[in-house]
Image (cartoon, rainbow, N blue to C red):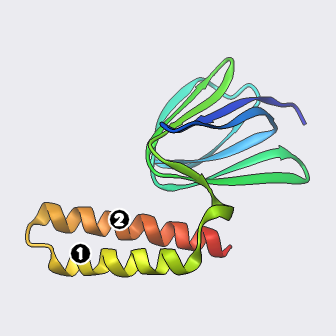
Amino acid sequence: MATFHFELVSPEKLLYSGDVEAVVVPGAEGLFTVMKDHAPAMAVLKAGVVEIDETANKKTKLFVRGGFADVASGGLTILAEYSKPLAEFDAAQLAQEIKNAEEDLADAKTEEAKKTAAAKIDQLNELKSAVAA
C-alpha cells in the first residue's frame, strides 16, 4: 500500500513522525481516514483515538484531546492540545478521574460548569473505552 508522511505534535513534544499507510482521525464532525493523495482538508479534533496504520501488521494508537488536523500535499499533521499513547494509561486511574468528574458535575452550580464537567466525563469515558479495547 502507498504511504504518506504523518506527524503528531503536542505542546510537549513530537509524538510521532514517519511514513504511514493510513491514519484514522477523531474529527469533531466524526471519524475520518486519511490515506495517500487525500484531498487537502483542515479539521477540528475532538477527544478520541488516533489510529496509525504504519504497515498492514503494525498499528499504533494515541489518545488526543482537542486540536487540529491538516491534510496537505505533504501529508497529514495533527497539532494536538494533549496526546499520550494508549498503552500509558492506567485503568484504575481513569476510573478515579471519571468518579471525580461525576462529583464535579453533581456539585456544579452554573450551566457552564455543568457543560464543562459533562464534556470531561464524555472524554474520559471515550478514553476508557479505547483503553479497554
Label placed on residue 104: 1
Residue 70, picture quadrant: top right
Q: Residue at x 14, y 73 (%)?
A: 108
Image coordinates of residue 56 in percent, x first then y, are 90, 49
Q: Residue at x 29, y 69 (%)?
A: 118
Q: Residue at x 25, y 61 (%)?
A: 116
Q: Which residue lies under the disc numbered 2?
A: 120
* 48 relative position to 66: left or right: right
Reply above or below: 39 against 84.
above
Reply above or below: 14 against 30.
above
- Front of the two marks 1 and 2: 1
Quadrant location of the N terminus?
A: top right
Q: Secondary structure at mark 2?
A: helix
Q: Residue at x 43, y 80 (%)?
A: 96
Image coordinates of residue 127 in percent, x first then y, are 53, 66
Q: Name the amino acid type tagged 2.
A: Lys
Image coordinates of residue 37 in percent, x first then y, are 74, 25
Mark 1 or mark 2: name the one nearer the start of the chain. 1
Residue 99, picture quadrant: bottom left
Q: Name the amino acid type tagged 1.
A: Asp
